[in-house]
Amino acid sequence: MDAVKNLFLLMLALLASALVLYADKHMFCGNLIRQFASREYYNVAGVVSYSQVKQITMRGKGGGSKVGDIVDIGYHYKVNGQTYEGNRFRYNNELITGHIAGTLSADSIWARNIVEHYTVGSIIQVFYDPINPAESLLSPGINGNDFLTIFSPILPFNLGFPIWFHAHERRGWFS
């Protein structure tokens, strides 16, 4: 009977892990994979069309709301004589630039610094996908914040399950 119970708990843990990893992949890692792939993008000179800090409000389920700042930027560039327009700073821009804390958060300061750096009319370096030149961004590659998108949803589960397992092991459930 103990072997059946242990097998059931192991299967339950594997199922829960699979669900967490599935959600992580589909909710967060798609943009992270694209951001990683952007390291291989070609670059070309472009011009900033507009650049501003935009304040967003996200409503929570409990009726509360959180205010944050995001970078709203547009630019145009030419590849092989054809003009393209882009508006992406990073693929995971919305995860990095706010919606966690108030407007004086580090993300708000980050957004303002980006807008100050990318002023309207300035010549910038645009990174574009050589297979699909309409796909572009201004900040390619991976940085430290990108890893938060992977570990933030997994961390509570990975910390909670061993604690739960240890507590129930002490009660003799697994012996």
Image: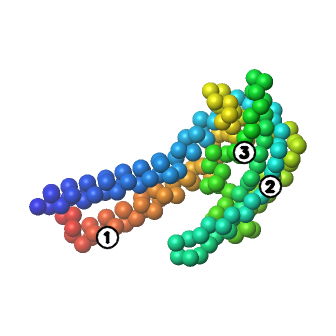
The residue to which callout 1 is attached is 167
Q: Residue at x 38, y 54 (%)?
A: 19
**Neighbourhood count class around disc 1 (C-alpha, 10 Å): few under 14, some 14–19, many 20 upward:** few
Q: Amino acid at mark 1?
A: Ala
| Residue 111 can be seen in this image | yes
Q: Residue at x 88, y 43 (%)?
A: 121
Position of 98 compared to 45: left or right? left
Mark number for residue 87? 3
Which x, y percent locates residue 131?
Answer: 62, 27
Q: Earlier in the sequence, mark 1 or mark 2?
A: 2
CA distance for labels 3 and 1 = 50 Å
Say which element carries label 2.
Answer: strand
Which x, y percent locates residue 53?
Answer: 77, 58
Q: Residue furthest bottom?
A: 63
Q: Is residue 82 above or below residue 136?
A: above
User: Disc 1 or disc 2, which is closer to the eye?
Assistant: 2
Q: How many marks?
A: 3
The residue to which callout 2 is attached is 52
Which x, y percent locates residue 60?
Answer: 56, 71
Position of 155 compared to 99: left or right? left
**Neighbourhood count class around disc 2 (C-alpha, 10 Å): few under 14, some 14–19, many 20 upward:** some
Q: Earlier in the sequence, mark 2 or mark 3?
A: 2
Q: Residue furthest top?
A: 80
Picture quadrant where residue 108 is located: bottom right
